[in-house]
Image: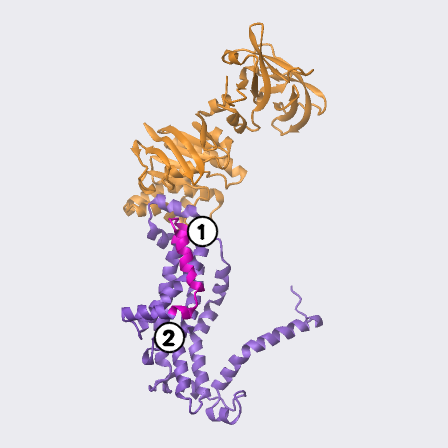
Chain colours: A orange, B purple
Amino acid sequence: MAALSIRALSKRYANLEVLKDIALDIESGEFTVLVGPSGCGKSTLLNIVAGLDRPSAGTIEIGGRVVNDVPPKDRDIAMVFQSYALYPSMTVRQNITFGMECRHVPRAEQDAAVANVAKLLQIETLLGRKPSQLSGGQRQRVAMGRALVRDPLLFLFDEPLSNLDAKLRVEMRMEIKRLHQRIGATIVYVTHDQIEAMTMATRIAVMHQGCVQQFADPDTVYRYPANLFVARFMGSPPMNTLPARLESENDGLVVVIGAGRPDEIRLRLRGYDGAASFVGRDVVFGIRPECIAEGSRAFSNDAPVLVDAPVDMVEPTGAETMVSLRLGGEPAMARISPDIRPVPGASASFALDTRRICLFDPKTERLIV
Amino acid sequence: MRDRSFAPSRIWIYLVVALIAAAWLAPLAVVVLNSLRTNEEIAQGSMIGWPQHLAWSNYAAAWSGFCVAETCAGIRPYMLNSALVTIPATIFSTLLGAIAGYAVSLWRFRGDNWIYGIVTLGLFLPQQMRLLPWTIVLRDLGLINTLAGLVLIHTIQGLSFTTLFCRNYYVAIPHELIRAARIDGAGFFRIFWRIILPLSGPILIVTVIWQFTHIWNEFLYGVTFTTGQQQPVTAALIALSAAVADIPQHGVQSAAVIIAALPTLLIYLLGGKYFVRGLTAGAVK
């Protein structure tokens, strides 16, 4: 059953169209992450789903029921906010029970629900405290408790981790994911952090300029980005995208970077027959930094594809070494073994994983293959 | 530790500050001193002078013995009138202003800024301009020469100020609190009562002090719309000086002025630190 269906939804403020013809179907039990740069409309979309904002057109169904005209409290949803939005003058317990109090849930039932959630989130000892007496991570937990206690059809998370420091963010990220696996809830989660999206989501909706650019599972989004925006947004550092030309040679396809230059790079493509119609035309060549490695790396059992390229800069991170290099004169990033340090200014040999190349149409910016 | 030793160069600062303080305190000093001098003493000497002996009887006379407008009960009944006007009008205007400020700051609705603008416009209309409209309203409601009429006037007119102050305080409250409460199922008044009001301590103290002082000290409406037994103390003080025009009673008048000023003075002394704090308090986090 679709827990959430959004159809032909748009939202405009005066002359500004912030959401354009959004369509999403989210299955029950899915962890969907809406990700995109700030201003892409993801939070507006979440607020519309919550009923805190009204769409200009389109319908929203939650659990098979059209909820366009249903107030937030009757949509069977719970929401966790970026600022946590804990009621400052209430204790943790009162924060958690406030919703049940509004719905006139009997006292005994409230107590049982609080005990249950407090145990799940390990906040039993905090129940008597005020939000001002809690740390950031504890506030985050209480905010989740307030949502969990409702046991809704749909959980909405609005950038819940962005106020936490880096270490805590990683911990809470794992905790939220574990929670999802344990209770199997349907979650719609908004973030601008593509790593959160990759690590937590069962499906990612990448948004940009009010449109959903791609809606797919994390592996697909990463491996086959639907367009150049997605390719450059997902991944850190993002995919290298270089202007190139597609040519045909001995019945095979060859992509040429920096054509005509003395250091031009020609790469044979296998399994990219879908791009045949682009032979003789410009394409955008996309390759992830981790698909460019030191020359001794073997990506497969086939003969390695090696290129010599000048090195601009080297950034050791400890776990790996990031290298800025030039492929056919175009700048690119490579991710190589930590113990290898090419010399900036000199040339070095790099191995390319040509099975994981993406080709984009430079005009439409869409993925060809 | 801060160096508290006296630097000669600072003498000018002290001199200027002392002069300004003296200028401000001089009228108060004259009134306080005169309230402790007998009538004869003032009549023989000048308006300015030390009391020969402390004449506390002036206070007793001003409080309950002196004749104002053909009734000889001192200013006590008029103090009661003032309290009966000031206390309800302060409570009503503060509460209504808090609700109005909450509505315009945390609930967006069509025309909210217009409504806010019109309400606060009241701050800029001169009092005299509103006398005539109020006369008509009070007449039509049958509230002329009643304390209820004054309560109504001060409640309505206080709204401009209380709405302005509460609204400016509430805009600092994160909107996500309201959103969270709406999802939790709370409505307009439940959110106000359970979430906003408990956060409002500082601003409510500020508005209460302001309203109380303002309404207590108000004179124009009191003297215009009430006569005789219904007057608030500010209007009665004038009647008192009129009644003793033939033989000046400066001692008793001074004592009456001091008594009449005591409530606002006490309110400020008790709540003054909250007043300053509340004016600067912003974030609720």
Is B264 located above or below residue A66 in the figure? below
Do the residues under discs 1 and 2 have CB atoms within 8 angstroms?
Answer: no
Q: Give the x, y percent position of residue A73.
A: 33, 42
Label 2 SS:
helix
User: Residue B92 falls in which quadrant of the image?
Assistant: bottom left
Dot 2 alpha-carbon crowd within 10 angstroms: few under 14, some 14 to 19, many 20 or more: many
Q: Which mark is residue B173?
A: 1
Please identify the residue farthest to the top as the structure is shown: A250
Callout 1 amino acid: Ile
Label 1 SS:
loop
User: Residue A48 falls in which quadrant of the image?
Assistant: top left
The chain to which mark 2 is attached is B
Is B13 located above or below residue A82 in the figure? below
Q: Which mark is residue B222?
A: 2
| Residues in magenta, as a range | B103-130
User: Which corner quadrant holds the N terminus of chain A?
Assistant: top left
